[in-house]
Image (spheres, helix red, strand yellow):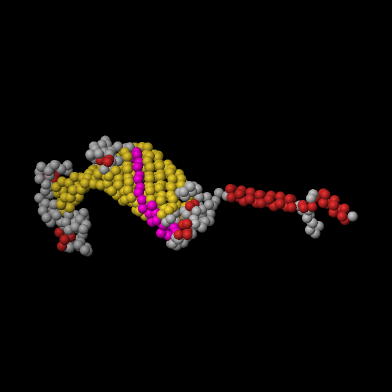
Amino acid sequence: MAVELRGLETAACGRDDDFKYDGGTAMSVRTLTAKLIGSLVILCGMTSVQAQESPFADPLDFDPDFRWFEPIYDIDIAETHPRRRPNNGWFASYDRTYMYGSRPELEVPQSDNEFIFDDGWGHRWEMGFMLPEEHTGWLFSYVQQKIAGANVTRHTRGNVFNEDELDGEATNPAPPFGWEAVPGISNNVGYSYRFFDETDMLNNIQLDSYELMKTWRMAPLRKGGIIEPWLGFRWMRVRDINSDQDWDSSNLPSDWSGTGVGDGDSSIETLYGSGGEIVTTRQAITNNEGLLAQFGGRYYTYRNRFKFSSDLRCFCGLNLQDSISQTTQAITLYDGAPIAEGDEVSGLLSTTTTPISVRNDEFMFGYDVRGEVGYQLTKAIFVRGGVQVIDMWGVWRGGDTANAPVNGGYTNQDLFLFGGTFGLELNR
C-alpha cells in the first residue's frame, strides 16, 4: 500500500529527479530556482528605483586618496588602466603666465600697430570636483593677464631736488627725512632728486576671465588617451587704457612746441606770476564685459611619469562696452623764475575736464587653446609647463573715435595673446 501511494505521488509531481522529501515538506528544484531569481529581480529593481528617484549624491562618498605626498612607484603606472590613472574628488592647479598681447588698432595708424606685441604676466587658477563612478564633475577657472607697453621720456624737475628730504630738516619733521611742506613734492622713491616720466601709452590691457563648466570624462581611446568634453559659461572683462602726456616748463625756451599752456616760460609766468611746470594727461579707459557661452574639451594621455594635455575653449556671446575719457592738468608752481635748484614749491594746482562716457554693444567670439607637459612628482602632484593662445574678436580698444581726447579705436577689434605657462596641479 505504501509503495502504491509513493508511486502516485511520484506520478503527480513529475520525475523522480524533481522530487525531494524532507520531514514531510516537498518542493521542486525548478520552483525554488524560480522563486530565488524572482526575489533577486525584485531586489535589484527596488535598488535601481531608489537610486533613480534620489536627486542627491554625497560629495564625500568617494576614495580620493588624501596621501597626496606619497611617492608614485613604477608598479603603480604599469598595472593601472588608463581610466584609473586620473584622480577623483577635488582637484586644483595654479600656473604663472607670461604672455604677449597685440596693440590696439587706432583711428590714426602707427606703422601697423596691431602687428606689434608687448609682454606681460598673469595668473591662472583652476579648481573642480570629479565624481568617481559617474565620471562627471564641475570646473571653475580664473585667468588674470596684464599687458603693458609705452614710450617714456624723463624730464628733470626745475628745482632738481627737495632739500628738506636731503638734509632731514623738513618743515614738518618726521622720520627718516621729514614730511614736505607741500604734499606731492618729495623726491622720487629710490632717488635723491625729482623728475617726471612723460608716458605715451602704446598698449595697456588687463584681462580677467571667470569660467564655470560642466565636465565629462569619456572612456579611454585605443592608445589610452582620454577626452573630457565640457560646456559652460564664461564672463570675461577686458580693460584697455589709452593715454598720452605732455610736459611743459617755464624754464623751456620760448619756441618750445609743447601742447600745454603756451610755448614755454612766458605763458606760465604770465598766468601764475612765477615759474612752473604743467603736466597734461589725456586718457580714455574702455571696458569690455563679455557674457559668453563656452564649449570645448580636454585631451590628455600618460607616458610613464609624463602627462601630455591640450585644452580647447570656444566662446561667443554679448560684449557690453563703455568708454570714459577726460583730460587732466597738474600744475606745480615755484617761488622763483627761472626755476633754480633747491627752489621751494609754492603751490600745486589740478584741473580735470568733465568725463565723456560712450556705450556700445558688440558680438564677441574667440578661442582659448592650451598645451602642456606635466611630470608626476607624487601620486597627486604634477609640475607642468606649456603654451597658451587666446584670440578674440569684438573688443573695443583706444576709446571713442569722435569724442576721446586721444586717438580712438574701433569697437570690433581683434585681441591676440600668446605665451608660456608654468605651474603645479594637485589631484587632477
Q: Is residue 41 left or right of residue 93?
A: right
- Where residue 143 appears, as percent x and y from the top left, is 37, 49
Q: Is residue 153 left or right of residue 16?
A: left
Looking at the rendering, the stretch of residues picked out in magenta corresponds to 373-395
In this orientation, which residue lies closer to the viewer: 220 or 188?
Answer: 220
Q: Is residue 389 left or right of residue 59?
A: left
Q: Is residue 368 a member of the stretch shown in magenta?
A: no
Please give the name of the residue rendered at 21% of the width and 46% of the height, measured from the top-left corner. 151
- Residue furthest to the top in view is 402
Please give the name of the residue rendered at 85% of the width and 54% of the height, measured from the top-left corner. 6
- Residue furthest to the right in view is 1
Q: Is residue 375 a member of the stretch shown in magenta?
A: yes
In this orientation, which residue lies closer to the viewer: 380 or 246?
Answer: 380
- Where residue 222 appears, as percent x and y from the top left, is 48, 47
Q: What secondary structure characterizes most of the magenta part?
A: strand
In this orientation, which residue lies closer to the viewer: 22 or 264?
Answer: 22
In this orientation, which residue lies closer to the viewer: 408 or 333?
Answer: 408
Please give the name of the residue rendered at 15% of the width and 59% of the height, measured from the top-left corner. 163
Quadrant in which the C terminus appears = bottom left
Please give the name of the residue rendered at 17% of the width and 58% of the height, measured from the top-left corner. 192
- Residue furthest to the bottom in view is 175
Count every numbered label the image shows and give the total: 0
Could one spot residue 356 in this view of the protein?
Answer: no
- Where residue 84 appears, as percent x and y from the top left, is 49, 54
Quadrant in which the N terminus appears = bottom right
Could one spot residue 268 in this view of the protein?
Answer: yes
In this view, 390 is above or below 426: above
- Where residue 28 appears, as percent x and y from the top left, is 76, 52
